């Protein structure tokens, strides 16, 4: 599995925005609960569809947290923005390989 996706999963987990690979696969990638474990075990790269969905969900989450009144949630926006950039980098690199 891609190093970028693994890092994004770990950071989302630290931020409290996902709690398991199944949750990450379903809510963030728009795939089945076994998608990320399959990528890990097979060594395959995520699909462009999954990367696009992840980028869109991260962007939405960033905007939500950035505009929230509570300072604690606004602080998460900075961490999420870094993930948005990583995800778009992964999307671009993957698209250029195919």
Image: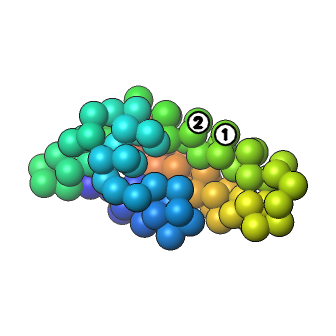
Q: Which residue in the structure is indicated by mark 2?
A: 56
Q: Quadrant of residue 74?
A: bottom right
* Residue 66 is at least partly visible in this image: yes
Residue 10 picture location, percent across and down:
43, 66
* Residue 4 is at least partly visible in this image: no
Name the foreground residue: 33 vs 97. 33
Q: Residue at x 37, y 61 (%)?
A: 6
Q: CA distance from mark 2 to mark 1?
A: 6 Å
Q: Residue at x 64, y 58 (%)?
A: 80
Q: Quadrant of residue 98?
A: top left
Residue 30 picture location, percent across and down:
40, 32
Q: Residue at x 83, y 66 (%)?
A: 71
Q: Is residue 70 left or right of residue 23?
A: right
How many residues crowd around disc 2 within 10 Å: few (fewer than 14), some, or many (20 or more)?
A: some
Q: Are marks 2 and 1 in contact (CB under 8 Å)?
A: yes
The residue mark sitting in front, 2 or 1, is 1
Farthest left residue? 42
Q: Which residue in the structure is indicated by mark 1?
A: 60
Name the foreground residue: 17 vs 9. 17
Q: Residue at x 46, y 64 (%)?
A: 13
- Mark 2 falls on what kind of element? helix
Please say if 96 is above or below 67: above
Disc number for residue 83: none
């Amino acid at each position: 599995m891609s190093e970028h996706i693994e890092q994004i999963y770990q950071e989302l987990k630290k931020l409290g925005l996902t709690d398991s690979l199944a949750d990450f696969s379903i809510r963030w990638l728009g795939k089945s609960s076994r998608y990320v474990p399959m990528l890990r075990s097979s060594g395959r790269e995520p699909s462009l569809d999954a990367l696009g969905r992840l980028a869109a969900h991260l962007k939405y989450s960033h905007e939500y947290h950035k505009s929230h009144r509570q300072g604690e949630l606004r602080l998460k926006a900075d961490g999420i923005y870094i993930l948005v950039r990583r995800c778009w980098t992964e999307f671009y690199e993957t698209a250029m390989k195919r």
